[in-house]
Amino acid sequence: MDKILVTGGLGFIGSHTVVELQNEGYEVVIIDDLSNSSEKVLEGITAITGKTPIFEKLDLKEKSKVEAFFAKHNDIKGVIHFAASKAVGESVKEPLLYYENNIGTLVYILKELKKLPEASFIFSSSCTVYGQADELPITENAPVKQAESPYGNTKQIGEEIIRDTCKVVPSLKAIALRYFNPVGAHESAEIGELPIGVPQNLVPFITQTAIGLREKLSVFGDDYPTPDGTCIRDYIHVVDLAKAHVVALQRLLGNKNKANYETFNLGTGKGSSVLEVVKAFEKVSGEKLNYQIVGRREGDIISAYADTTKANDELGWKTKLTLDDAMRSAWKWEQKVRG
Ligand code: UD1
């Protein structure tokens, strides 16, 4: 079976994707610098799949080590590239760190892939490229808006770098996957999200509040022009998201792609408000969540959810899990980790 490199394979989305790849029989090699993950995640992956992936601790900023890695693993057929920094606020304070981590390392990897006779490349992009879209649901043809943060800009620039490279390197095929809001955990509770410090994202903040790690959830604004006044997002179960990576990779490996560079939205197609997420959590956990409405968070968009037609039709992929499933698994994981 084909050998696939997963960078950032011990992170939240990466680890769930490694599980799905191994379940499909792929041989997986993980590179991770452990800056926002732990080697213990390997145990979770092994517990679920019965197989331990090859793991090399490697910082992709070290160009010579990246070259040596690819020289050693010259039979790699595809790369799923998750490794990147993702804290929006930090990116505003440390833009060069973000450009170096997210753009510099992407260039190194593409240079190595250029040397291979054939290579398939999957890039973690984000719905952040659309900003506040003019039309909902958001299709892949919606215009890319001026990025709000260096983090968001690295996703836009990353996509452009890949697109430009694919134009001139016929042996390279790539897909950029634009994620909406990934949430939940593996149903086994062997792997899940492990935010360092105070979570910035809604779902880990909810589960940490319920377990007693945080006093209460601040709901950022209830005066938006939405049915209940709170912001709307498209929350996609991380296991559904992970499976989309496998089908995207299979599309490239099987030469079913229409162009050398393609983009796909990955969401459920359904928008949920902050209060709906809170209610879903309360329902599946049986816990009462302590929350308070506070002022708006700077930079928040009002509403974003995906038009999933392209991913459904061309990847033959559909989400199967619900928001309730996601909240149930996130809660089970939180209880296992901190309970
Ligand atoms: C996140 C990123 C954003 C990125 C987007 C898509 C952060 C801070 N923002 O935003 O840059 O473009 O994913 O990749 O990482 N909320 C609360 N209380 C909380 C936390 C969140 O009410 O304590 C609300 C937010 O206002 C928002 C919703 O919950 O309406 C989801 O928030 P979050 O999980 O941060 O995701 P995004 O806002 O989509």
Image (cartoon, rainbow, N blue to C red):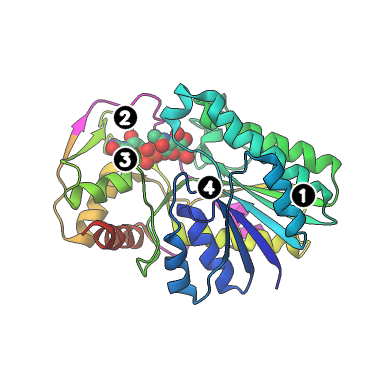
Q: CA distance from mark 4 to mark 3?
A: 18 Å
Disc 2 designates what residue?
Answer: 224
Label 4 sits on a secondary structure element that is: loop
Task: Characterize the magenta stretch by its predominant secondary structure.
Answer: loop
Q: CA distance from mark 2 to mark 4?
A: 40 Å
Disc 3 designates what residue?
Answer: 197
Amino acid type shown at disc 1: Leu
Left/right of residue 199 with respect to residue 308 in the rendered view = left
User: Which quadrant of the structure image shows residue 155?
Assistant: top right
Residue 290 percent location from the top left of the image: 14, 44
Question: For the point 24% across and 48% down, which residue is it?
Answer: 208
Left/right of residue 191 with respect to residue 208 in the rendered view = right
Closer to the chain start, of discs 3 and 1, is: 1
Question: For the residue with label 1, is its CB less than 8 Å from the closest atom of ligand 1?
Answer: no
How crowded is the residue under tag 3: few (<14 C-alpha within 10 Å), some, or many (20+)? few
Question: For the residue with label 4, is its CB less than 8 Å from the closest atom of ligand 1?
Answer: no
Disc 1 designates what residue?
Answer: 113
Amino acid type shown at disc 3: Gly
* Residues at circles 1 and 2 in contact by the CB criterion of under 8 Å: no
- Which stretch did the figure color magenta? 293-321
Amino acid type shown at disc 4: Asp
Task: Work out which quarter of the rendered image holds the N terminus and state it.
Answer: bottom right
Which of 160 and 277 lies nearest the eye of the viewer?
Answer: 160
Which of 72 and 147 lies nearest the eye of the viewer?
Answer: 72
How crowded is the residue under tag 4: few (<14 C-alpha within 10 Å), some, or many (20+)? some
Amino acid type shown at disc 2: Tyr
Disc 4 designates what residue?
Answer: 33
Q: CA distance from mark 3 to mark 1?
A: 35 Å
Residue 257 visible? The answer is no
